[in-house]
Amino acid sequence: MRSPEEVLRRLQQSEQALAAAQCQLQEREEQLRQTCQELEETEREHQRRRKRNQRKRPHLPPVQLEKRTEILEPANKFCPRTGQARPRIGQEIATEYEFEPARLIIKEIVRPKYGQCGKDCCGGVAVAPLPPRLLPQSKLGLGLAVFLLLSRFDDHIAYSTLEPNFRERFGVVISRQQIVQWVEKIAHLLLAIYWAIWDELKAGNYLQIDETPVSVLDPEVRGKAATGYLWFYNLVENDVRPPAGGSPRRQPSTRRPLGGSPLLSSTKLAAMPPGSP
């Protein structure tokens, strides 16, 4: 027969074992709860990603594009018995985007010349003055000049690519050298804007300049690449004053980039015009 002390000891051991089991059960329940929360959060994140990645139904852009309407009449518009037009009760509209390829045309400016009427009142030959041209004594039109600048400096199409494009798509031979000469002359026309920007840059007391080397491929030279440079300028709008005995320290401010125009850069070396620092 067990003594009361042994029974009490065994009872205490059972209580301790039960308490330890309850602690382990609580820990496992906590781990299971955390795991469920992580799974729920992962599922919610997946749902958010799916919603973001879902392709929305495309709509017409909020811009004013030219709209051309084409009306398609049905073959049975008229009544087969009486021949009268059937009453119109509505319409169905389908919208699609269309693109008209660019066209290269020859613009011929004709200025008729008129002589005297036989009396002294006319005073010589009458002819209308020639409108101002973008480049005097050149066949470059304004529309073609805009197309070349956008293709080269906005679409980043190389001169060596523009030349075959004109030949293959329009049947016109415009050499790469001719295109480069046109762009160079247009760049000189923009020098006034360039110098105005440069004067505004020099007016501040803190100017940021970044030099970026660029490898330029020359289609006439195989296996080699020339090294070009691009300089970007950034003007800090707020004044930056150096501390006493220290170097200039830029204060938090809104920065406005005023870099040089890419039109002033040649194909192989992007440099500033003569006289620039």
Image (tube, rainbow, N blue to C red):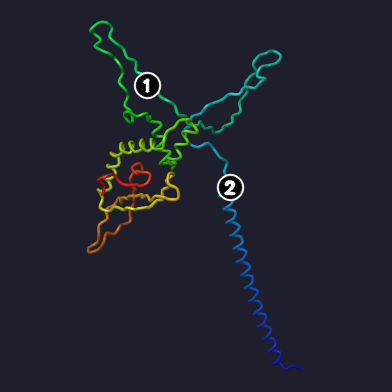
Residue at x 22% of width, y 64% of height: 245
Q: Residue at x 59, y 29 (%)?
A: 93
Residue furthest top in the image: 118
Above-or-below relation of 18 to 208: below
Which badge, 1 or 2, is on the more N-terminal residue? Answer: 2
The three-letter code of the residue at mark 2 reads Gln
Q: Nearer the viewer, residue 21 or 172?
A: 172
Disc 2 residue crowd, few under 14, some 14–19, many 20+, Cα 10 Å:
few
Please tell me which residue lies in front, 214 or 21: 214
Q: Is residue 22 left or right of residue 205?
A: right
Residue that carries the numbered disc 1 in the rendered image: 109
Q: Amino acid at mark 1?
A: Ile
Residue 57 position in % (x across, y down) = 57, 41
Where residue 169 appears, as percent x and y from the top left, is 50, 32
The label shown at residue 54 is: 2
Quadrant for the N terminus, please. Answer: bottom right
Q: Is residue 67 left or right of residue 145?
A: right
Q: Residue at x 70, y 88 (%)?
A: 10
Quadrant in which residue 273 is drawn: top left
- Kindly check if marks 1 and 2 are in contact, taking CB atoms under 8 A apart as contact: no
- Marks 1 and 2 sit apart, C-alpha to C-alpha, by 55 Å
SS at mark 2 in the image: loop
Q: Position of residue 182 (x, y in %)?
A: 36, 35
Q: Up-down: is 124 above or below 12?
A: above
Q: Secondary structure at mark 1?
A: loop
Q: Position of residue 23 (x, y in %)?
A: 63, 76
* Occupied quadrant, residue 129: top left
Nearer the observer, disc 1 or disc 2?
1
Q: Is residue 97 left or right of residue 215?
A: right
For residue 95, side relative to residue 265 (left or right): right
